[in-house]
Image (cartoon, rainbow, N blue to C red):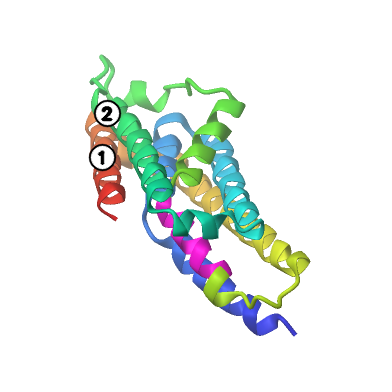
Amino acid sequence: MYLEEFLLIAISHFFAVASPGPDFAIILKHSVQYGRRDALYTAVGIALGILLHVTYCLFGVAVIISSSPTLFASLKYAAAAYLAFIGVQALRSKPSADGAQAMMLQSSPYSPLQAINKGFLVNALNPKATLFFLSLFTLVIDISTPVTVQAVYGVYMALATWLWFSGLALFLSRKKVRAFFNKAGHWFDRGIGVVLLLLALRVVLL
């Protein structure tokens, strides 16, 4: 009965999660700079962020956000500030004495919980995600669809997001891939910083 609706949601979600954005940038950075373990925990945080979006949509908070320009603007600026903060930190990266070899051996400064929290905040504060789930729960999902079914949709999207970014983390954290990205050493980190700052600017201009 709900198969057609689910397939539409699955296709829409796939294109949304596969498009480059803050989530991809943070997974790329953590995979290359800190390795597989950190990136996989970050992917868990991103998936938890998806559950947050689903939860407030189920409770109708998304409608309140969309009807309050001030509230939504505050969300945008908070997201932009967080992305800019991470971007500035990356821009301040300095070359190490041992070059790429030292960067390859760099350990993560984050505990598993901190890595999860970082991924969660990047996704939860992403206005693009807010707009996506708002449109999904108001335009795609029929109002007559039971809340339990909508919750199943949400769990699917969270799991699909986790699998997608975990797969990216596994690929990007491979030694050969990390070595390729790390050839530029600190310049790679600075490049990610520029990307994050541009994303922050894009969020403000949405």
Q: Do the residues labelled 1 and 2 touch (CB within 8 Å)?
A: yes
Q: Name the residue under label 1.
A: 197
Determine the CA span between mark 1 and mark 2. Answer: 8 Å
At 69% from the left and 82% from the top, the residue drawn is 3
Q: Position of residue 60 (x, y in %)?
A: 61, 58
Residue 121 in magenta stretch: no
Q: Which residue is drawn at 41% across and 56% down?
A: 128
Residue 48 lies, with reference to residue 184, above or below; the image says below
Residue at coordinates 35% horizontally, 25% vertically from top-left?
103
Q: Where is residue 24 in the image (x, y as percent from the top left)?
A: 41, 49
In percent of width and height, residue 97 lies at 25, 14
Q: What residue type is labelled 1?
A: Leu
> Residue beneath label 2, please?
88
First in sequence: mark 1 or mark 2? Answer: 2
Residue 117 position by quadrant: top right
| Residue 179 vs residue 5, the one in the foreground | 5
Q: Which residue is drawn at 46% across and 59% down?
A: 67
Q: How many labels does the image show?
A: 2
Q: Residue 133 in magenta?
A: yes
User: Which region is colored magenta?
Assistant: 127-137
Give whichever of 162, 73 is nearer the camera: 73
Q: What element carries label 1?
A: helix
Quarter of the view holding residue 125: top left
- Please tell me whether residue 31 is drawn above or below residue 16 in the rendered image: above
Q: Which amino acid does label 2 sit on?
A: Val
